[in-house]
Amino acid sequence: MALQEKYAALINAAKSVGVQNLQVREQNNVLYIDGDAPNGAAKDNLWNIYNQIDPDFRAGDLILNVDVSAASGSKAKVTTETSNLNIRKGPGTEQPIVGKAAHNEVVTVLNQTNQQWWLIKTNNGEEGYAYSQYLTPEQLG
């Protein structure tokens, strides 16, 4: 129960921003928060609260597994030199890699979190944060 108390602000925020299918469980001294965020800004808000509770995400006692399920966003092209672009669990290079977007692949931008990190989703459903320097917005038309 101690972890749910530690992360009470995060759990309450998940409820207040409208995370659907919210599941909170504790297992092996790790708190798991799962669900579907209504938009990228809501997911970013949760990461910001998490960072306030556990700066730099060092405690290792929380798994935040909240996806942006139904969001529609703009498109961007992966513009790395030749390699794939890492997709990370959270905004930052210290976050684990959860997928890759291929060089020249077009991805959906769910939210432009900040100048450096954008929340994206690939065509095969991988969702996470990518370094925006390697994403070029697609022009419509």
Image: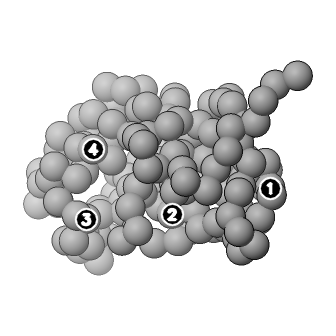
Closer to the eye: label 1 or 4: 1
Q: Secondary structure at mark 1?
A: loop
Disc nearer the start of the sequence (3/1) = 3
Disc nearer the start of the sequence (2/4) = 4
Disc nearer the start of the sequence (1/4) = 4
Q: Secondary structure at mark 4?
A: helix
Q: Is residue 108 above or below residue 100?
A: above
Specify whether 81 is left or right of 89: right
Which image quadrant for residue 6?
bottom left
| Pointer 1 residue | 105
| Pointer 3 residue | 57
Closer to the camera, 31 or 108? 108
Instruction: Check disc 1 and give the amino acid type.
Output: Glu
- Residue shown at the point (27%, 34%) measured from the top left: 13
- Circle 4 residues within 10 Å: few <14, some 14–19, many ≥20: some
Q: Is residue 119 above or below residue 31?
A: above
Specify whether 121 is left or right of 37: right
Q: Quadrant of the C terminus?
A: top right
Closer to the eye: label 3 or 1: 1
Closer to the camera, 71 or 5? 71
Instruction: Check disc 2 and give the amino acid type.
Output: Arg
Residue sitting farthest toward the right: 141
The Cα–Cα distance between marks 1 and 4, rounded to whole angstroms, is 28 Å
Disc nearer the start of the sequence (3/4) = 4
Label at residue 48 = 4
- Circle 2 residues within 10 Å: few <14, some 14–19, many ≥20: many
